[in-house]
Amino acid sequence: MDATLESRLDQLTRHHAELGEALSGAGISGTDFVKLSKEYSELSPIVEVIAALRQAQSEMESASEMAGTADDPEMKALAEEEMQALRERLPELEMRVRMSLVPKDEDDERNAILEVRAGTGGEEAALFATELFRMYQRYAALRSWKFEIMDVSETGLGGFKEASASITGRGVFARLKFESGVHRVQRVPETEASGRIHTSAATVAVLPEAEEVDIVIDDKDLRIDVYRSSGPGGQSVNTTDSAVRITHLPTGLVVIQQDEKSQHKNKARALKVLRARLYEAQRQALAATRAADRKSQVGSGDRSERVRTYNFPQGRVTDHRINLTLYKIDKVLSGEALDEIVDALTAADTAERLAVAAE
């Protein structure tokens, strides 16, 4: 490892020891104790890996010295055998140290708001949006997450113009954050008599769920309209003004919720979605500032970006950001094989973060 990285590891080890001393000292306030304890616990796993690396480096030096000075052939052979074992172990420990230094996405453990919208392609796009929404619903079930449908706007022919859901569970946003973008489908629609392949698209957005303390929304910045909810074709679904449309005046963001019969529940859900969208806007602005002109290997997550193609005639799914193709479209859409894509995207993102951390 280079001298700069070695120096950084020494600094982290010293800081961890200083935190330990501060925590064991008298007179520390409750607020400071909580803050220092959190930092100490976050650093502890990193320091443990550093300690393991330092120990292995020390053992390598001792074994190397013994191999070079030992007169006894048996001792010399033993030292060389130990050196070989350490040569195989050291790169793994170095990688673990580097990985521990990669900046974590603070939102990875958050729950998420999923939004799927039909794009170009008319009814075929709406049917595809339905399939994508169901794919994430099945995937959530496989991971024992809670999938709560928040709002669905149907076409009347089985398709979704748009649909949203709240997904709750461990590491939801970490697993789904790379799903944002334009998903394209290539297939022969059932209504296509000539057998010609059509290309349609749907847009997916995965937003980290924001808490009230993350985003404070001023009531004067909101315009709230209530009306009767409607179903396919515009017919009235119920006789009370339960549907809610909230407009965030400073940004122009509009959120509509009408699935619940209670106006209060629809308002609460709409505010939840609005808060998530505002939080995501802040995240994107911060990421753009931090990244400057650097473009992530797995893409920016911008909704205008085509991220994946589902080709039914060939039975393949291709993620364009990492050039990954799986010939198991049915298993991907059932949620079973989605982890293979998610794992590959996560690995690519980690590699990019690792490269950035090393600069």
Image (spheres, rainbow, N blue to C red):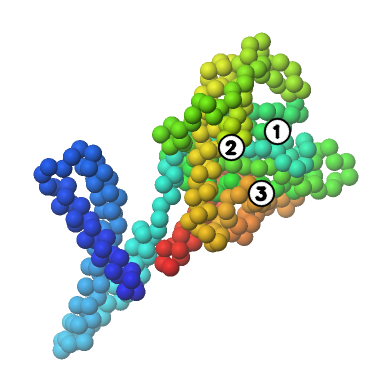
Mark 3 sits on what residue? 304
Label 2 close to label 1 by CB (< 8 Å): no
- x, y (%) of residue 103? 40, 55
Quarter holding residue 163: top right
Location of mark 1 (residue): 161
Amino acid carrying label 1: it is Lys
Residue furthest right as drawn: 194
In this view, the residue in front, 131 or 224, is 224
Residue denoted by label 2: 251
Q: Position of residue 337 (x, y in %)?
A: 57, 47
Which numbered disc, 3 or 1, marks the residue that appears first in the sequence? 1
Which marked residue is nearer to the observer: mark 2 or mark 3? 2
Residue at the image point whose x is 24% and y is 46% from the top: 36
From what the image shows, is residue 67 above or below residue 124? below
Q: CA distance from mark 3 to mark 1?
A: 17 Å
With 243 as the anchor, is 275 left or right in this view?
left
In the image, what residue occupies the spot 48% across and 43% down? 173
Is the residue marked by circle 2 packed among few (<14), some (14-19), or many (20+) residues within 10 Å?
few
Residue drawn at (62%, 54%), measured in percent from left and top? 319
Q: Determine crowd level at label 3: few under 14, some 14-19, many 20+ residues with C-alpha closer than 10 A.
A: few
**Whole-percent x and y of residue 213?**
41, 34
Q: Secondary structure at mark 2?
A: loop
- Given this view, does label 2 or label 1 mark the residue nearer the observer? 2
* Residue most extreme to the bottom: 71
